[in-house]
Amino acid sequence: MADKTILKALRGETQAVPPIWMMRQAGRYLPEYRATRAQAGDFLKLCYNPELAAEVTLQPIRRFGFDAAILFADILLVPQALGADLWFVTGEGPRLSTITTDADFAKMKTKDDIHKVLNPVYETVKILSSELPSETTLIGFAGAPWTVATYMIAGRGTPDQGPAHALREGNNALFEQLIDLITVATIEYLDMQIQAGAEVVKIFDSWAGSLKDEAFEKYAVAPARIITQELKRRHPSVPIIGFPREAGDGYIGFAEKTGVDCVALDNSITPEWGAKYVQVDGCVQGNLKSSHMVTGGQDLIDEVRHVRDAFSKGPHIFNLGHGITPDADPDNVALMIETLRETA
Ligand code: 1CP
């Protein structure tokens, strides 16, 4: 078990061929995913159907032989488990009932109530931990408190997280209560995923980039540190990947400040910058541009080699800088893996 390539990278080993997986590797660019999603009825039914959620998690492993599988679920299941209404509008994205007043917050459930809704997710993890090939690492995940809060406050995805910033400034006490509730719920959620068989967990802070300076420290760094410290206390050997997307200079020292074992890098920074300022502190993950999965060709081959070589002097998990998009060509995914694994 200790030989899994992802776990080696997370322990700080430099490997000639880095392990690879891909954000959103189970997704709409795969015809087999679209077929299973249609069978489930809709996206949320798929998330809460353990057999089918395990099936779509396994599809990219069977097709491409990635070194890790990421649990199929969504960061917005936690708000739902805390009492928010959640639905998806086709072609537009998620919608949630909003939290903007103390009265809205008072209606929320507690961290101990979440498992009733989230139990099917733990079932999915159990199925996966028995069905995955022995060399494949199972990654669980949750959204970071700030990113989850942005959806709970606005009721949808927002380009600038304006409503969340407005609440942070307008009713900071309520905002902080919400961050604290998501933080404790996330600890329980990830703990249960680990107990069910997740070998690594990743915390997605997709909107960390809109927090600056002191706000970044308070609402991106501190919650990640609280979650990491408590999970490490309960499960000392389970590695944690942090992803403060578009943090810029906030990436520097993030691993040290939070205790995460690996920092995932997005596409706003170059691999050279990431190697110099982030990989010096340990394992990094990333950061090929997702657009190469659409365009392919020699540019893709050149960029895979570029990213691999830039991070070759330290521990590295190869990945995209953000999720693969629905218009990507599965053949380009295969070409990325083949290029990465060629003898350098
Ligand atoms: O139509 C469909 O099939 C739904 C598309 C989809 C998928 C495949 C959504 C809706 N979520 C997912 C799965 C998902 N989401 C995974 C599964 C594992 C994987 O293969 O990677 C993960 C890890 C997520 C995480 C997630 N959900 C994030 C963080 C990562 C990121 O992409 O920044 C966020 C922000 C979400 C919210 C969400 N869920 C779905 C959409 C379209 C969105 C973004 C909404 C928005 O901001 O407008």
Image (cartoon, helix red, strand yellow):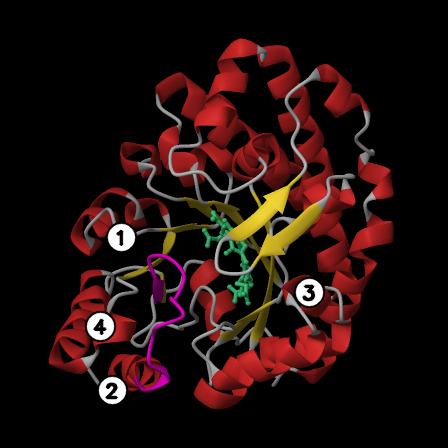
Disc marking residue 342 = 2
In front: label 4 or label 3: 3
Q: Which residue is mark 3?
A: 47
Give residue 93's position: percent from left, percent from top. Answer: 52, 53
Mark 4 or mark 3, which has the lower sequence index? 3
Amino acid marked by disc 3: Cys
Does 166 sit above or below residue 282? above
Q: Tell me the element at label 2.
A: loop
Amino acid marked by disc 1: Asn
Q: How many marks?
A: 4
Amino acid marked by disc 4: Val
Q: Tell me the element at label 1.
A: loop
Q: Nearer the viewer, residue 43 or 8?
A: 43
- Could you tell me if the residues under marks 4 and 3 are in contact, i.e. CB atoms within 8 Å? no
Q: Give the spatial CA distance, label 4 vs label 3.
A: 32 Å
Q: Tell me the element at label 3.
A: helix
Neighbours of disc 3 within 10 Å: few (<14), some (14-19), many (20+) = many
Disc marking residue 267 = 1
Mark 3 or mark 2, which has the lower sequence index? 3
**Residue 118 magenta:** no
